[in-house]
Image: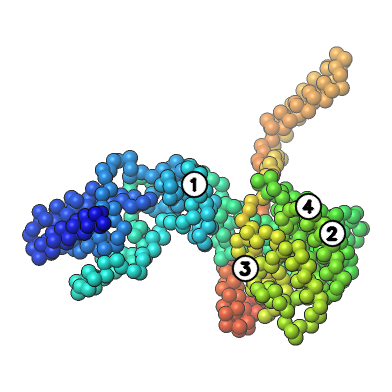
Amino acid sequence: MKMKFFHSIILITLLYYIGKSTTSVKSWDHQHLITSLLNNKWTSAGRRPITLPTKPNKDHSMLILILLLAGDIELNPGPRTKQQSVYPCGLCEHPVTWNCEGVCCDDCSIWHHKRCSTDYDLLQRSNVQWLCCKCETINVSTFTFHSYELNTSNYYEPLTHNSTFESITSNAFSPLKTSSPKGNNSTNTSSPKSSKSKNRTTSSNVFNIQTKRNLRILTLNCRSIKDKTSEFAAAVNYIKPDIICGTESWLKGVKPGKNTTQDAIKSSEVFPENYVAYRNDRGTLGGGVFVLVQNDIVAVEKPELVTKCEIEWVKIQLKDQKELTIGSFYMPHRNMQDIKELDKSLDQISNKNTNFILTGDFNCPDIDWNTMSINPNAQDKEIQKALMEVLMSHSITQIHETPTRGENLLDIVLTTNPSLIKTSTNAPGISDHDMIITDCDTKPHYQSKRPRKCYIYSKAKWEDLHEELDTLSNKIRDMNQNNATVQELWDTFKYELYVNLDKNIPSKLIRSKTSLPWINHKIRKMFKKKTRLYQQAKRTKNWSNYRHFQKECKRQVRKAEWEYRI
């Protein structure tokens, strides 16, 4: 009660001086007194000091009144030092300035850059817990830069019934929804660029998610990948997934854990070169599943988990020494035999006590995954009910919600750990099914490949090289006459040969290219336009414009590839 009374006295005193300053513009002493009182460094919990101008201004008093009515101004902040105006990051120790996005610990008041904290994107989505790296305190708030939401309630509502206050425009207190400056910096200290590595899945498209901790899985129905190699390569180049789970590949000759047949279609003929293919082909017309993994991700095929159905499993090594198993499944026609074989496969992987994600075309459109019920008028109701019971018995959750073929949800994403999934969205497909882009909150273990050394023989000094090799030949002959061992002769020849090659032939380092050279700026613009038309068609249910432009986009991609190769 004493503190409330004391605060009331201070407020009445300030309002008295404000009233006198507004009635007489010349009474600069009163206004300067208020400024000096409030100019001692206003701070609140976790915010930077704010300094008011000391020059008299006719709008000065009104701004002070607005700040007082905000209810979040520290009345006695104490003295300010120069060191308090710099807020170093708790991870990189570079200052967190006003033009940086960051998060502050509620206990130790240490700021962290957005680019340094992997939990920043999660904080913007929901009230999740995060651990401070300095004080190890668990924070549950989502207080971040540029997110100071003003409360709609006003504790000083009787004071707002003033024509002068109500006539204030948004320019006097801009912006309306935040108290952080969006324009010029309030400090001269510049923030250096992060030395962290760039994102794994970075692209200038609508499916890009900018985060350092992400695993992107692409699920698609191909309906003959042989006939759609150009469209498939262009889609992969645009979306940039880490793992691709495909169904209806229509390939032949490859089975998990078995030798490849002589008439097998090679993976290098249809799949991008920077992916390792794990296939389970049907062998006859139609069907077939595959899992593609980027060649720098540590992965191994799991043929022991494959049963007598169209399914393929691959184990991914994660960065934190954990494992994640990725599977692709296809049920061409609803039948109880495939459900039983799927149950056997899930029994084997459940015994290993590991997280897994299973995607594919299940062809069960009558299941309501939100209520876990089946449409009473559904065809093959018993089969769809059996699938639902199998998934519930293994504690598996279905993540994807958007229909993938017309109004039917045929392609789904299943997992035993729903917290791994961040987003699951649709994208224009290469067949009559939409593709599914699933972003997971995990990071795989990468095994980067060293660049290859390539000699430029067109610029070689052949005459000098021939002379050096003649000298080397005489040296080897003399060593042989002096009873040198075979190992000594070989080591000398190998060392001298590479020295002479490096001396007389220039070289360069070559890295594997992941981008398609024929995908130029024009093709990328067409991809973006196709995505916009796809999203518009999903809203309006009018697919004519999208179908027409999809055919034109396919024709231009094939034309660009053909012109590049010839």
Q: Point out the frontmost of discs 2 and 4.
A: 4
Q: Point out the frontmost of discs 3 and 1.
A: 1
Residue at 33 percent of width and 45 percent of height: 85
Q: Whole-Å distance between the Cαs marked 2 and 1? A: 45 Å
Residue 385 appears left or right of 555:
right
Q: Point out the frontmost of discs 3 and 2.
A: 2
The disc labelled 2 sits on which kind of residue?
Val
**Residue occupied by mark 4:** 352
**Residue occupied by mark 2:** 306
Residue 328 location (% of width, % of height):
77, 63
The mark nearer the N terminus, 1 or 4, is: 1
Residue 213 appears left or right of 498:
left
**Residue occupied by mark 3:** 425
The residue nearer to you, when weighing 158 against 384, is 158
The mark nearer the N terminus, 2 or 1, is: 1
Residue 383 lies, with reference to residue 187, above or below; the image says below
Quadrant where the image shows the C terminus: bottom right
Image quadrant in which you'd find residue 362: bottom right
The mark nearer the N terminus, 3 or 1, is: 1
Q: Which mark is residue 137?
A: 1
User: Is the residue under label 2 in contact with that under label 3 (CB below 8 Å)?
Assistant: no
Q: Whole-Å distance between the Cαs marked 3 and 1? A: 34 Å
* Secondary structure under the numbered disc 3 in the rendered image: strand
* Secondary structure under the numbered disc 1 in the rendered image: loop
Residue 511 location (% of width, % of height):
67, 46
